[in-house]
Amino acid sequence: MPPLFVEQHQLDRLQPRTLLSYRRSVSIWLLWLDANGFSPSTATQYDDLLVEFLHATKITRSGFTTLLAAVEFVLPNLRRELRWSRTVLSSWRVLAPPKHTAPLPWIGGLLLASSFILVGRHSVAFGLLLAIRTGLRPGELLGLQAKDIQLTPRGTAVLALGAKRGTKVG
């Protein structure tokens, strides 16, 4: 019999955003199970129905990854038991190359930045232009602090990004 509730210390380990995505994906899956009259009781049945759901709904790879993690989180007894679902996901990663997008051109960044300035979002405009010019990813830009910026005697700025402590810093 599956657990009746998830332990609070397990819930505390998750970020609120992760918990929300888990709830959303499991809810959709449970609605699909109910609509099709399925009520799995063994690990093999859960495994088969996860893959069946994948094919019936054309869920994305990231959506299926989230669903699989959510089911294993909610039903910890299924961890390491969903072999077919894991195999399908692993094959999907090998066969589906990542999609790359073209970077935003400088002129497009200028247009967007000017729009942000017009609505009073000066810091967003500056961050956008800084990210385009330096190649910073959004997470790196948001994590940037004043101590990460060093000015040289010639007036140029050097961004000190990367690991600052740990075993690989040298």
Image (cartoon, helix red, strand yellow):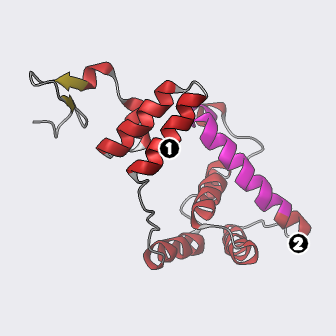
State whether the magenta stretch is mostly helix, strand or loop.
Answer: helix
Looking at the rendered structure, the kind of residue marked 1 is: Leu
Is residue 136 something that shows in the picture? no
The quarter of the displayed image where residue 133 is located: top left
Q: Which mark is residue 111?
A: 1
Label drawn at residue 36 = 2
Residue at 81% across / 59% down in the picture? 30
Q: How many marks?
A: 2
Q: Is residue 29 above or below residue 170?
A: below
Magenta region: which residues? Answer: 11-31
Q: Is residue 145 left or right of residue 113?
A: left
Residue lying at 10% horizontally and 25% vertically, measured from the top left: 154
**Residue type, mark 2 in image:** Asn
- Asked if the residue at tag 1 contacts the one at tag 2, i.e. Cβ–Cβ closer than 8 Å, the answer is no
Residue 149 placement (x, y as % from top left): 25, 25
Instruction: Answer with left or right where residue 138 lies relative to residue 62.
Output: left
Q: Residues within 10 Å of mark 1 (few under 14, many from 20)?
A: few
Which sits in the foreground, 132 or 67? 132
Against 40, is 130 above or below?
above
